[in-house]
Image: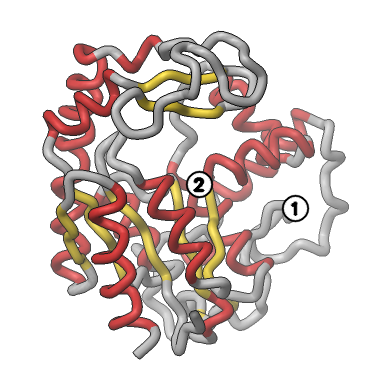
Amino acid sequence: MRLRKAARVILIGAPGVGKGTQSERLLQRFPQLSSISSGDLLRHHVKQRTPLGIKVESTMKAGGLVPDDLMLRLISNELTRRGWIYSGHPSGNVMTLASSSAVDTTQAPPPHPGDAAAADAEMAAFLSSPAHARGGSEHISSPHQQPPQVNDDPSASFLLDGFPRTAAQAERLDAIVPINLAVSLRTPLEVIVQRIGGRWVHEPSGRVYNTTFNPPRVPGRDDVTGEPLVRRPDDSEEVYRARWERFRETSEPLLEHYARKGVLWEVHGLSSDEITPKLFREFERRFVE
């Protein structure tokens, strides 16, 4: 099905609600839609030993949170690389992942990808750069410092996964690219707890089974290899309820942010199969009809 205008979408929902399932189904139904995963982008830069990858590798290994400035820079760079946003800065020299200065990148050669000291210097240059060069709006006051321009062609449609997670992040993202549909996926807590309790995983492949709606052919064994399935440590009810409470605390301000923008849409269902047709209809109403 072909889109008539660009869709810039995020899915918001508690862990286990089925965001991944809905994303896959949207991508299959609408070929012009692309997925941009902040986690995948970070892992790519770590693997490629880019300056940003070098900077965040230790944080990621320790399970810490990558600073918002770097996440915004990462997303801005990816959208610019794909031609989905254009620099609003007159010189065109908005900070990129390989630049060493937000204003003039020609005065010094780029750092060697494996040079940690150079990576630190580049990060310092970025963090001290004007807000318009790194996705912040608080200093866009001059007519010569305009926010990026957005490509509204349907081919510039995307699902943004993993960011933003808070209202503060969403507000800063607005200065880079305006989200025009924020979907809140709603499934009752007790239903998700039951779903989590029946989940089994084949760790080498990542295949996931559920004893309630997607059981393995042989109980406790992977369908493909026959190897044993395991339960993830964080799939216990106690751990999940704590994760759900943390999500609720951070998501309410995020949902309120997008409600004020007029782009929030909520969908309720007991299962992914119940939610999907409702999501398709709303998506088509907004971007196809």
Number of numbered discs: 2
Give the residue at mark 2: 71
Answer with mark 2 or mark 1, whichever residue precedes in sequence. Answer: 2
Residue at position x 36%, y 47% in the image: 19
User: Which labelled disc corresponds to residue 182?
Assistant: none
| Viewer-nearest residue: 37 or 52 | 37
Residue nearest the observer in this picture, 22 or 262: 22
Residue 224 percent location from the top left of the image? 64, 25
Q: Which kind of residue does numbered mark 1 sit on?
A: Ala
Give the image location of residue 283, x and y in percent.
Answer: 33, 74
Q: Is residue 128 visible?
A: yes
Identify the residue position indicated by label 1 in the image.
Answer: 98
Q: Which percent across, then down, holds residue 266?
A: 17, 60
> What amino acid does circle 2 point to?
Met
Residue 174 in the image, given as x and y percentages of width and height: 36, 66
Residue 92 higher or lower than 63, as above or below: below
Rendered-image quadrant of the C terminus: bottom left
In the visual, does 250 lie left or right of 115? Answer: left
Please rate how many residues cluster around mark 2, counting C-alpha atoms within 10 Å: few if below 14, some from 14 to 19, many from 20: many
